[in-house]
């Protein structure tokens, strides 16, 4: 006998952290399994927000039993889909729950006054898996890659570090670089595909906010200043390149940012930063490095693949800009 399922969708703010903890812990296990990411610190932070009852979103229930949730975050004129996750013993019900939650969340955002842009990057889902709710709402997809380098495997690349041009110093990250680092990010992503995916890159203020999120919050792992590096022009003191790194598991590092000033492209500065970081992380007993990159950014993708990275996951960044905004 087939049991007809009628999902009930309720406001996320009706639920406590205690009620949603089992679902979030199941999701954290999947982050570890699929992406080698210890998501526990992010889970605990999200549970704190859930108990404050401030996150806009929805919960799905099957015959009274919680089976999924989705939420968003407002950032001025923009909303970001923070997460959408369902977990049941029935794959069809799990998919139905996730689709239904996304449809409800996107409907909420599309008709929210003052919201002109919506962004989403759900790394756990293979590219195309969640296309229907987004494409039917008018979103534009941008396929991205989650790459990994296994530092315990035999080298599959030239381990020698590219030499730096004269007058360029490679130095450790310092909080003294905060403001100029944001300016470097803004400059590096001018007219870049990633500025279409994340509009924070489009302004200096947004780039500063992006940098603040990387350094202060565990959404992309715990920031490791001792594994982060900048390139300085000796004569002027200007920052011309930067690699920032976080810890996403005890033995796994994640490169959250690698950028080079537009005027200094073509000098293999990105390769020099990457190889220096890889060699330094290898000596610190790190077993793997991960990062994300937009698929059409071929120069960056080719650099990573030449350096020994492989594709672990292909996922979608989804972007919606309200017509006339």
Image (cartoon, grey):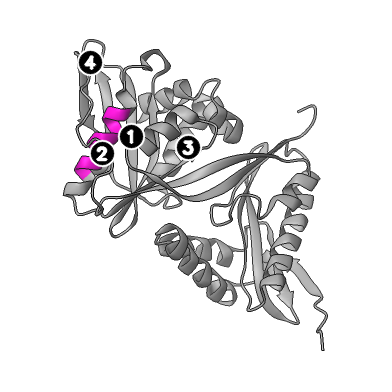
Mark positioned earlier in the residue sequence (3 or 2): 3
Label 2 secondary element = helix
Instruction: Report the span colored magenta.
Output: 271-280
Q: Quadrant of the C terminus?
A: top right
Disc 2 vs disc 1: Cβ atoms closer than 8 Å?
yes
Q: CA distance from mark 4 to mark 2?
A: 18 Å
Label 4 secondary element = loop
Q: Is residue 64 above or below residue 254?
A: below
Disc 3 vs disc 2: Cβ atoms closer than 8 Å?
no
Camera-near label (1 vs 3) is 1
Mark positioned earlier in the residue sequence (1 or 3): 3
Residue 282 placement, left or right of 22: left
Q: CA distance from mark 3 to mark 2?
A: 21 Å
Spot occupied by residue 26 in the image (x, y as percentages of width and height): 52, 72
Quick one: 211 or 269, which is closer to the camera? 269
Residue under numbered circle 3: 210
Mark positioned earlier in the residue sequence (4 or 2): 4
Q: Quadrant of the N terminus?
A: bottom right
Mark positioned earlier in the residue sequence (4 or 3): 4
Q: Residue at x 39, y 62 (%)?
A: 38
Residue under numbered circle 2: 277
């Amino acid at each position: 006998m087939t049991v007809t399922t009628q999902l009930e969708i309720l406001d996320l703010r009706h639920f406590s952290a205690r009620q949603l903890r089992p679902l979030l812990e199941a999701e954290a296990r999947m982050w570890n399994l699929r992406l080698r990411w210890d998501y526990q610190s992010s889970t605990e932070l999200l549970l704190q927000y859930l108990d404050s009852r401030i996150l806009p979103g929805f919960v799905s229930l099957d015959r009274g039993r919680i089976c999924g949730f989705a939420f968003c975050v407002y950032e001025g004129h923009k909303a970001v889909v923070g997460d959408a996750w369902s977990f049941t013993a029935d794959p069809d019900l799990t998919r139905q729950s996730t689709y239904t939650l996304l449809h409800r969340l996107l409907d909420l955002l599309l008709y929210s006054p003052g919201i002109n842009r919506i962004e989403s990057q759900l790394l756990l889902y293979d590219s195309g898996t969640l296309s229907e709710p987004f494409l039917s709402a008018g979103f534009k997809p941008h396929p991205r890659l989650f790459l990994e380098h296994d530092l315990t495997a035999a080298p599959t690349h030239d381990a020698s570090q590219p030499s730096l041009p004269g007058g360029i110093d490679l130095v450790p990250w310092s909080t003294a670089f905060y403001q100029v680092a944001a300016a470097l990010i803004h400059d590096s992503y001018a007219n870049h595909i990633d500025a279409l995916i994340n509009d924070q890159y489009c302004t200096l203020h947004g780039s500063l906010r992006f940098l603040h999120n990387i350094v202060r919050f565990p959404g992309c792992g715990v920031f490791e200043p001792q594994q982060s590096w900048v390139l300085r022009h000796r004569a002027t003191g200007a920052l011309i390149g930067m690699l920032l790194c976080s810890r996403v598991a005890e033995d796994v590092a994640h490169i959250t940012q690698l950028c080079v000033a537009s005027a200094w492209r073509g000098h293999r500065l990105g390769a020099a930063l990457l190889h220096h970081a890889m060699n330094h992380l290898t000596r610190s007993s790190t077993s793997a490095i991960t990062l994300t990159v937009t698929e059409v950014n071929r120069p960056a993708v080719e650099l990573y693949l030449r350096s020994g990275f492989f594709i672990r996951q292909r996922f979608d960044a989804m972007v919606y800009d309200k017509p006339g905004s």
